[in-house]
Image (cartoon, coloured by chain):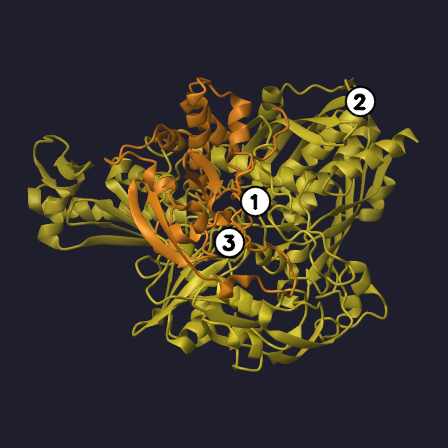
Chain colours: A yellow, B orange
Amino acid sequence: MSQAAADPQAPQPLPRWDAAAALAVVGQPHARASALAKVTGRAAYASDAMPPGMLYAALVRATIARGRVVAFDATRACRLDGVHAVLGPFDLAWPGIAVRGRRLRPVIDADVRFVGEEIGVVVADSDAVARVAARAVDVRYETARACLTIEAARNADAPAIAGTAAPHNVVGGVQQIAHGDLAAAERASDVVIDAHYSTAAQHHNCLEPHGCVAQWTGEGLTLWDSNQGGHLIREALAATLELPRERVRVVGHHTGGGFGSKIFVKPYHVIAALAARQLQRPVRLFMARREEFVASHQRAPTRRHIRLGATQAGRLTFIDEHITGQAGPCPLFAINAAGAANGLRLHRADALHARIERVLTNTQSPLPFRGPMVAEDIFCLEQAVDELAWALAIDPLQLRLRNLAEVDALSGLPYAGKQLARCYELGARAFGWRASPVRAAIAGGRARGSGVGALAYDATLYEPSVATLACTAQGRIVLRLGVADIGTGADTVFAQIAAEALGVPLARIDTHWGDTADTPRSIDASNHSRTCAVLGPSVRAAAQALKAALLDAAAQALQADASQLMLHDNRVACRADPARAVALAALVHAHGPIERSAARERAPEGVFAAMFGAHFVEVEVNLRSGHVRVLRAMCAHDAGRILNPRLAASQVHGGFVQGLAMALQEERVLDERSGMQLNAAMWAYRTPSIADAPASIRFIDAGAPDGGNSLGVKGLGEPPLIGAGAAIANAIHHAIGVRLRHYPITPDKVLAALRGRAA
Amino acid sequence: MTRIHAPRRIRHLPAHGALPTLRAVNTDTSDPPPAAASTERCLFLTVNGQSAAHTVPAHTTLAQLLRERLHLTGTKVACDQAACGACTVLLDGQAVFACHTLAAQCDGADVRTIEGLAAADGTLHPLQQAFIDHDALQCGFCTPGMLMALHAALQGARERAEVPDRDALAHAIAGNLCRCGAYPHILEAALDVAGRR
């Protein structure tokens, strides 16, 4: 899965589309392909599926943080009208989800490891009855001591949460990243910053809840599922249920938000499938909003002790981080709790060190959330870099420009493309960046300030990826992709690539996606800002192969040499005499279906592919209320070649708004005695509304075609979130002269900090 | 932009007494709501110009009636807590949260959903076209609610012979959450239709 690994089976890349390539369709602001379906209400989401005879399921969830279910009494629940089944931990041999040849714990069992864990399911005639019945199940527990915080789990007398020998519940040992001589670099430092930071748990809170509708027929299982990629769900579910892959079909044409939370098979998939099989009826199992918070995962809270040093001239000498992430109860998901590599590759320094500890707790497992592990890291590290700049009395932008990394220090490889300097330059120019002292703009009880923050994000996940293109009997081109439409524009940009490679108008291409029954396996899931980079080259190669096949077929029909032919909209014509032509439809009639597939091109070797960016932000702090408003944001990104500038701008807007919310307002609030979440409601968890968004967010394309693949593309899904936080926090410091190191920077923290400064 | 408060879109009933209370939201109490014990209600409804009588359990929400009985699944239910606006429809011309409007409250009412926003011949409403042109959507789950809320606001402004400005349009959708954060393009599209661009 890593780009450093040899990739000998994959085909050689096609000739590169470099900066000078004359492209007609790629790079144009074409309208989103699914937009018409979405504005008319016709777009089909998994939660819209209602097969005849469908029943409604609701999960029974644990109300204690750690212990065992000793009795699961469904008597009261079963008495309710319309209840079909109540299944608890002792009623079925629930299987564990199969992951890479291993089995996780059963999807329902008597062990409770966090508040909200699945302990049973009710199936009923309606959603209302199912939910009422789920609450009417009488559960008796044997409670055990739970560890709800990192501190509690690390205590010398804390219980072993995963039941394995992990000293102080630090799972997998302490991870070390070490590059360069730290002691020597410290000695060479004139100034050292030493500060503690933290980030909070952030919920994905997708508008379309997690869930699926499961139906068994003679062919097997059909699952309408809200996910980020159906093929991975299908494979994991087939393995879990011990079915041949062909007997599982996963359908999800549009997904109402994922952000990393809908990549993997989760217990509800398996529970819905088994309940539907048990009852011989289709079963719908979607989460209520409360369950989206308490049991649909989140970004892990982290603590970070950051030290960094520089010479008086502003040369970065070292970065040394000690990071602790809250890892939840399951060692397998603990990896998502914390990381540091992308922060460390952002700037050049003599020594780069990090110690990462992932601490098991009785809280739900962390799962990837847009820029997973990286946003937490760079939100904090880029504030520390800003602290260093102010300590040195150097303009924060200047300090960053003086420490541009030429090679990736951690791998020792040159970058496949790096336009970070251009991000700084274009972003600063568009923003009107100029150095000014802190607290320079205070008037009428409000203080304004500006901040900058940079970001890096590795582009290092690859897997087998196939795209298929076919010409139909109607003369249309059908592009088949095994992806989901999560709103990123995958429905649009791949057709642009195909149209470009074929030389036909975009309107001639129909893209099919979202159903494993009629698509090839194109990607595990749309995550890690890589769908374009992984799948794009396959689409182009398949288009070139289809074009060659069409020209060959036409050469026979027209009695001409294929090299003298061209594809022109709905026909193939002779270059010399365009009137001599044959319609695509006629070719298919004569030859039968013409279809070509292509696999992903070979991953780059000897280079390190990564995305970069720099955000410039102006904020206004209300000195009486402590409320922070972001007034405007200039987001300069190096995302390689931009396939569609309009959709790219949408990604940047959305990423920035989500990052803004992570920086200023979103946090999970847990009762630290019971483990109950206190803000598990849409109105209590501060999801950003239009009132929170800045008046202006601008995307500045500071990139250039990248060397990482033949299309020159990188990603833009996650970087806009990653770059938002530190730029905002640094602007707050610039406005009020106080550092706020603990995200989210809510008004109470701002007021307390202002009072502390005044005192 | 001035500070915006979400418009209130839960329709309150004249005191009937006989109707059950709204379903409890996010209370983790052990008392089940009286959903299972509810009785049937008969109501007459005009939806997107089509009138019909419906008999539903009294606890049925307008959103459930639209989605599960009439298969008008363009109306989305995202939070079911009257807090995100995804289920916004027009009830006698007013934007309401369909997830917290009981169907029984709507007897004799005229309901318009996203499926009824375009003209009968399929011609898109200017807001729909502007949403496409400005890419004012990403995953699309909030889009029907956004469109209905904006439509109500623009209609209301027209009746008052006003041209809504940026703040007024933002206010109109301050109760509609877009988790993808498409707000800048949504506002551009709305300003375009309002004639402010």
**SS state under label 3:** loop
What's the residue at 46%, 49% (across, down)? A256
Discs 1 and 3 lie in a common subunit: yes
Q: Residue furthest right?
A: A759
Q: CA distance from mark 1 to mark 2?
A: 37 Å
State yes or no: discs 3 and 2 in contact (Cβ < 8 Å).
Answer: no
Q: Could you classify mark 2 by the number of other residues whose Cα lies within 10 Å: few (under 14), some (14-19), or many (20 or more)?
A: some
* Residue A267 place in picture, x, y as percent: 53, 68
Above/below status of B78 relative to A112: above
Q: Is residue B146 visible?
A: no
* Residue A178 place in picture, x, y as percent: 74, 52
**Disc on res. A439:** 2
Residue type beneath disc 3: Leu
Q: Earlier in the sequence, mark 1 or mark 3?
A: 3
Residue type beneath disc 1: Ala
| Location of mark 1 (residue) | B83
* Residue A133, quarter of the rendered image: bottom right
Q: CA distance from mark 3 to mark 2?
A: 58 Å
**SS state under label 1:** loop
Task: State the quadrant of the C terminus of chain A.
Answer: top right
Front-most of residues A375 and A548? A375
Q: Chain of mark 1?
A: B
Q: CA distance from mark 1 to mark 3?
A: 23 Å
Residue type beneath disc 2: Arg
| Location of mark 3 (residue) | B19
Q: Could you classify mark 3 by the number of other residues whose Cα lies within 10 Å: few (under 14), some (14-19), or many (20 or more)?
A: some
